[in-house]
Image: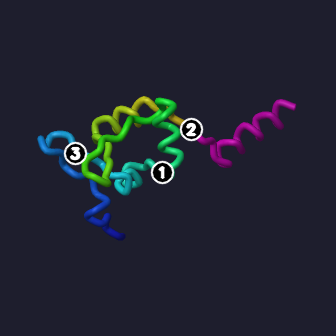
Amino acid sequence: MTQTPEHQKPRASGDGLDPFVPFEGLQSLGITFCRQYLREMIVRGDFPAATRVGRRRIGWRLSELRRWMAARPKVVLKGAAEAEPNKAENEAAA
């Protein structure tokens, strides 16, 4: 199992209470959108706005990302194993 490189880990903010997450650290939270799609989502208001943390660096507050993730709808995918019993029930009823 590989470890996350140091530059991709969430970084603590100045107050130490709510770390900043750089773009590279989003993947460790399960957010795998490309930069362009994230920009589009931010413009639409569908993703938290980034905060400039350096001259050429942006990041997101971890608390804002967690709040965004909690507000997203949960998607449940039905697997083939779940579809088979329904098929058998329909055939038995026919």
Residue pointed to by mark 1: 35
Of 91 and 73, nearer the camera is: 73
Horizontally, residue 18 falls left or right of residue 82, namely left
The residue shown at (68%, 48%) is: 80
Is tag 2's residue or tag 1's residue first in the polypeptide sequence?
1
The residue shown at (48%, 42%) is: 39
> If the image is split into quadrants, where does the N terminus sit?
bottom left
Mark 1 and mark 3 in contact (Cβ < 8 Å)?
Answer: no
Horizontally, residue 16 falls left or right of residue 71, namely left
Query: At which x and y percent is residue 62?
Result: 29, 41
Is tag 3's residue or tag 2's residue first in the polypeptide sequence?
3
Of 75 and 10, nearer the camera is: 10
Disc 3 is placed on an element classified as loop
Query: At which x and y percent is residue 60?
Result: 32, 43
Q: How is the image coloured?
A: rainbow
Residue pointed to by mark 2: 76
- Which stretch is magenta? 76-94
Marks 2, 1: nearer the viewer: 1
* 19 in magenta: no
Q: Could you give the CA–CA distance between mark 3 and mark 1, rounded to whole angstroms?
A: 20 Å
Q: Amino acid at mark 3?
A: Pro
Find the residue positioned furthest to the right.
94
Q: Which disc, if any, is residue 89? A: none
Query: At which x and y percent is residue 48?
Result: 39, 35
Q: Amino acid at mark 2?
A: Val
Residue pointed to by mark 3: 19
Disc 2 is placed on an element classified as loop
Mark 1 and mark 2 in contact (Cβ < 8 Å)?
Answer: no
The residue shown at (64%, 46%) is: 79
